[in-house]
Amino acid sequence: MMLNPDERRLLELVAQTREPVAMSDYFHEIHPPNFSRDAAEDDPARVTWTELQMSLYRASLKLWESGLVQVVHPANGERPDLVSVTDAGHSELA
């Protein structure tokens, strides 16, 4: 399977954990904010960063749909789904 760089990096980070984790915990690590906190909502850097964050949500969904991660603890209204990497996911990274 061909993973894009964001999908691969997200899968790598999830694979490094021993406990189930929320994939969104890694979004700022993959694409950290590159604008000041007081930047306007239409600031080009903020807009670009928001698009990158949305692409990470799509990457999360693709990893799950492809069977590379599995939901271990479903979202409960206080936290998102917690996932772990499947055997297929580990094979993809090998």
Image (spheres, grey):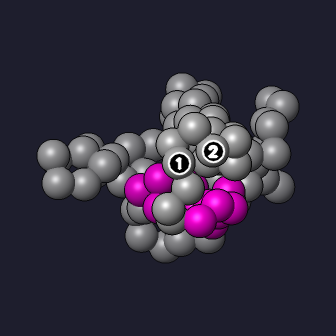
Residue 40 picture location, percent across and down: 53, 48
Specify whether residue 90 is painted magenta. Answer: no
Q: Is residue 58 above or below residue 76?
A: above
Q: Quadrant of residue 5?
A: top right
Nearest the eye: 68 or 79: 79
Q: Position of residue 26 (x, y in %)?
A: 55, 61
Camera sees residue 68: no
**Amino acid at the residue labelled 1:** Ala
Q: What residue type is labelled 2?
A: Asp
Query: What residue is rendered at 69% in x and 42% in y?
Result: 44
Q: How crowded is mark 1: few (under 14 residues within 10 Å), some or many (20 or more)?
A: few
**Which residue is at the front of the view, 61 or 53?**
53
Residue that numbered label 2 is attached to = 43
x, y (%) of residue 35? Answer: 64, 61
Q: Taking 43 as reference, is 3 left or right?
A: right
Label 2, residues with CA under 10 Å away: few <14, some 14-19, many ≥20: few
Residue 38 as seen in the image, left or right of residue 94: left
Could you tell me if the residues under marks 2 and 1 are in contact, i.e. CB atoms within 8 Å? yes
Q: What element carries label 2?
A: loop
Res 70 visible: yes
Q: In this view, does 65 lie above or below 44?
A: above
In screen coordinates, is 84 left or right of 43?
left
Q: Quadrant of the N terminus?
A: top right
Q: Give the range drawn in magenta.
A: 22-36
| Picture mark count | 2
Mark 1 sits on what residue? 40
